[in-house]
Amino acid sequence: MLTIREEQMEAMGQAAVKNFEDQVIEDLKKSVPKHCRLLGEENLRRKVHAGLERARSYGLSSENGLRLFVELTFLLGSSFDKDPQLPWAAEILNASAADQAARVERLHQRSMDYLEKVSGPGNQYIDQALARVRTEPLEGFSQGSLGGFEDYMVRRFGLLYPEKCLYVGEDALRGLIRSGLGSAKNHGLVTQRGVTLHLGLMFILGSGFDEDLQYTFASEVLSAKSVTDPATKANRLYAGALAYLDRWAA
């Protein structure tokens, strides 16, 4: 009788996981080729592996559920499941009463509706927003402005990407700003330029952009111990963001 030792079973399991990751990567290269190209092979695999791990933490185990979750980390940001702009994602993923298939279907329908209305036909809306990023001044707020800084940022978001603001809603935008103020401070971004830039990148790229492997320019600047001056850090982050946009447009 053929017997399979425990370590052989474990190896077979690891091989199956590796094979599934390979399949997901090949699918992503077809569905989001630009994202994959900019990531590079090593970071692409790391991002897929991390996405699958987080998907499983929500009880997702079906191929459809795992693939959808990972693809959304590319389309909505690696932390889409915790993003204040996308409260519906966390609500669906954490719905214990619904079975897995129902949750996956709800997540698919809601995310496709979001992408259709926020990205626009042929990604027209997002492309226009990214073009505006280049001309957006990072200064401008003064204590004499109508309302406070939070009101000011909501208005700026509306000018930068009106379609997204309309879909997300003001309450979610204010939640993003409040969480972003603390995050910016933790990164040493305490000037108006730095805070405004940090909030803008959260708004455009997703609230977890600073930890997203798609945007290593951000983590490299924000984690650099050699850069302690807040103004210098903000300038380098801005330069990195513009360089990324150049690569995206190329």
Image: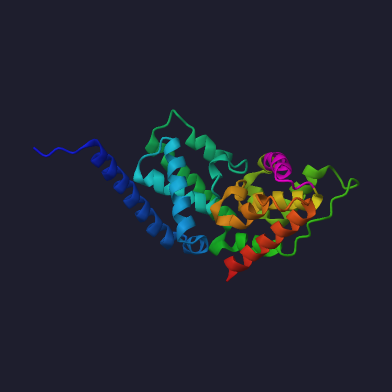
What residue span does the magenta drawing correspond to?
174-190
Instruction: Pinpoint residue 59: horizontal percent, then vertical percent.
Output: 41, 35
Name the main secondary structure of what is drawn in magenta: helix
11 to the left or right of 120: left
Magenta stretch encompasses residue 179: yes
Q: Does the magenta segment cover residue 236?
A: no
**100 versus 35 height, above or below:** above
Residue at 39 percent of width and 33 percent of height: 99
- Report the residue that reaches farthest toward the left: 1
Q: Is residue 199 visible?
A: yes
Which residue reaches farthest top? 97
Nearer to us in this view, 187 or 130 = 187
User: Eyeballing the image, is 138 above or below 79?
Assistant: below
Please give left or right for residue 97 compared with residue 171 in the image.
left
Looking at the picture, the colour scheme in use is rainbow
Image quadrant in which the C terminus is located = bottom right
| Residue at horizontal 49 percent and vertical 64 percent from the top | 37
- Foreground of the two, 76 or 250: 250
Q: Position of residue 4 (x, y in %)?
A: 18, 39
Q: Quadrant of the N terminus?
A: top left
63 sits to left or right of 190: left
Q: Which residue is found at the position 54% from the left and 53% from the top? A: 213
- Measured as percent of width and height from the top left, residue 192 is found at 81, 50
Against 57, is 27 above or below? below
Residue found at the very far front of the displayed protein: 226
